[in-house]
Amino acid sequence: MSMLKSDLDTPALIVDIDILRFNIDDMAAFAAANGIRLRPHAKTHKMPQIGKMQLEAGAIGLTVAKLGEAEVFVDAGCRDILVAYPLVGASKHRRLVELCERAQITTVVDHVDIAEALSQSMSANGIQLPVMVEVDTGLRRCGVLPGAPARDLALRIARMPGLRFVGLLTHEGHAQLAGGPDQVRATGLAAGEVMVETAELIRAAGLETPIVSVGSTVAAKITATVAGVTETRPGTYVFYDRSEVLHQIVTPDRCAARVLATVATRPTADRIILDSGAKALTSDRTGVSPPVAGHGYVVGHPDWQINSLSEEHGSTSVPADDPARIGDRVEIIPNHICPVINLFDTIHVTQGDRVIDQWAVAARGKTQ
């Protein structure tokens, strides 16, 4: 492929290959230096090309949110997948059985009813499914409470045919909303410590607990440093986004993925319309506490603010004397890159000003 970024129609999703590689290698080096396993969350990028880059850099496998994502990555040759989401219902169990015949699949449970149903399906098909107990360390999403509740669930799973208890998992995503760097650090460390304490409680009950898995990009280099944590599962780090910039994790130059947009019109001196609305940027303002103003960072224009989005319009305030003209191109670092990736069929891989490749977002829309 031989073209320039300026040749692309907009809105377009562009990913700088050199920044992408740097981010992947940097996290792999961190995991290696701390003696922990890296199992990155592929729901961020949804692309086998990037998953393979992560594996080549040292990841021991990939994490996904849904079976549909797992199927895409197994089809692409990935052979060790963690499905970090409760799998409920006969249809999902049938698909899980089929995947287990082709790859090493691990999943999570946080309730005895989920475990019992999995046990019946797996044992009926002669499968010993590795299972981790998901622990709620503060996010208040999925997960059994740490301590005795997690221990009791682990002990029950260990007695169920068709299941093999292999450890504990948490997503310390609440660190994202903890506040400034000191609060993020304290929250990440606390999550790691309670996971290690829970693992020790299970071991004291006579059950081996080889895996203590944590995962959140904002706390990736914090929680994983707690002695006793064995695995980390960051996802956003491959691209980073405005949230990590605001958390002072990285600077904007480390954000590999950007939405390329065009100034479509300028209705007033102090307002322009970008051709990137909710269908290109999403309306997600989460990721920091309090939620950030605006819908992305316009690179090179710190005084621009994308105030509101409709489906195809990004209404942006600018200084009245700003020289921006209709037809100008800008790059936008999204607030939250994960849902943005899912809005595009393809990404354009860039190196400097050149477009060097185009990759399909193969797991786009795989929500089941």
Image (spheres, grey):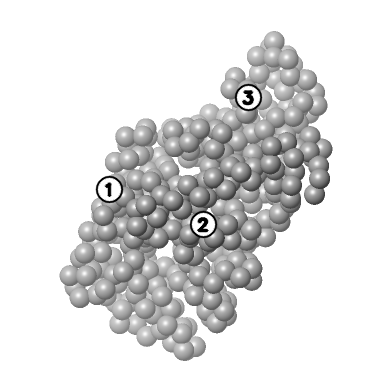
**For residue 298, side relative to residue 2 (left or right):** left
Residue under label 3 = 300
Disc 2 to disc 3, how far (Cα)?
32 Å
Depth check, mark 2 against mark 1: the one in front is 2
Coordinates of residue 102 in the picture (x, y in percent)? 57, 79
* Other-residue count near label 2 (Cα within 10 Å), few / some / many at <14 / 14–19 / ≥20: some
Coordinates of residue 129 in the picture (x, y in percent)? 43, 78
Whether residues under marks 2 and 3 lie with C-beta atoms below 8 angstroms apart, the answer is: no
Q: Report which quarter residue 67 is drawn in.
A: bottom right
Disc 2 to disc 1, how far (Cα)?
29 Å
Residue type indicated by callout 3: Gly
Residue 116 visible, this orientation: no
* Other-residue count near label 3 (Cα within 10 Å), few / some / many at <14 / 14–19 / ≥20: few
Residue under label 1 = 190
Coordinates of residue 181 in the picture (x, y in percent)? 36, 34
Residue appearing at x 30%, y 82% in the figure? 159
Disc 3 to disc 1, how far (Cα)?
37 Å
Depth check, mark 2 against mark 3: the one in front is 2
